[in-house]
Amino acid sequence: MSFDRSKTPNWRPGYRFQYEPAQKGHVLLYPEGMIKLNESAALIGGLIDGERDVAAIIAELDQQFPGVPELGEDVEQFMEVARAQHWIELA
């Protein structure tokens, strides 16, 4: 099964992506706690706005970081994990 890059990710209700100075990084806050995101996940998460589809997120990152191998696959993998963990919805 291939990943559908035309889907638009959005954080689930109750989930909030933000920079957390105490954590010195970006986190995903939710009612039960907090997840500290690594740098790659934070870059992807910062582009999840309910407007951009996955293809647009990949294109934006490709402009910021030209020539990164497997960038699209990395973004797809993040989306799969985020969906499996119920952080995002894909519409």
Image (spheres, rainbow, N blue to C red):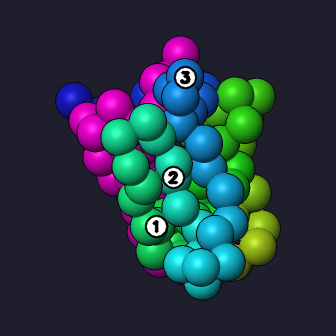
Name the spot of residue 67 as percent of width and height, x first: 61, 80
* C-alpha separation, residue under disc 2 versus residue under disc 1: 7 Å
The residue carrying pointer 3 sits among few (fewer than 14), some (14 to 19) or many (20 or more) residues within 10 Å by Cα, namely few
Name the spot of residue 33 as percent of width and height, x first: 38, 49
* C-alpha separation, residue under disc 2 versus residue under disc 3: 12 Å
Q: Is residue 70 magenta?
A: yes
Quick check: 77 left or right of 28?
left
Identify the residue position indicated by label 1 in the image: 37
Is label 1 in a helix, a strand or a loop?
loop
Q: Are marks 2 and 1 in contact (CB under 8 Å)?
A: yes
Q: Are marks 2 and 3 in contact (CB under 8 Å)?
A: no
Image-quadrant location for residue 24: bottom right
* C-alpha separation, residue under disc 1 versus residue under disc 3: 18 Å
91 over 71 or under it: above or below: above
The residue carrying pointer 2 sits among few (fewer than 14), some (14 to 19) or many (20 or more) residues within 10 Å by Cα, namely some
Residue situated in front as seen by the camera: 46 or 74: 46
Q: Is residue 88 magenta?
A: yes
Name the spot of residue 5 as percent of width and height, x first: 52, 34
Quadrant (top left/top right/bottom left/bottom right) for the N terminus: top left
Q: Residue at x 59, y 57 (%)?
A: 44
| Range shown magenta | 67-91
Is label 2 in a helix, a strand or a loop?
strand
Point out the tag, 2 or 1, that comes first from the N-terminus: 2
Task: Name the kind of residue labelled 1 in the image.
Answer: Leu
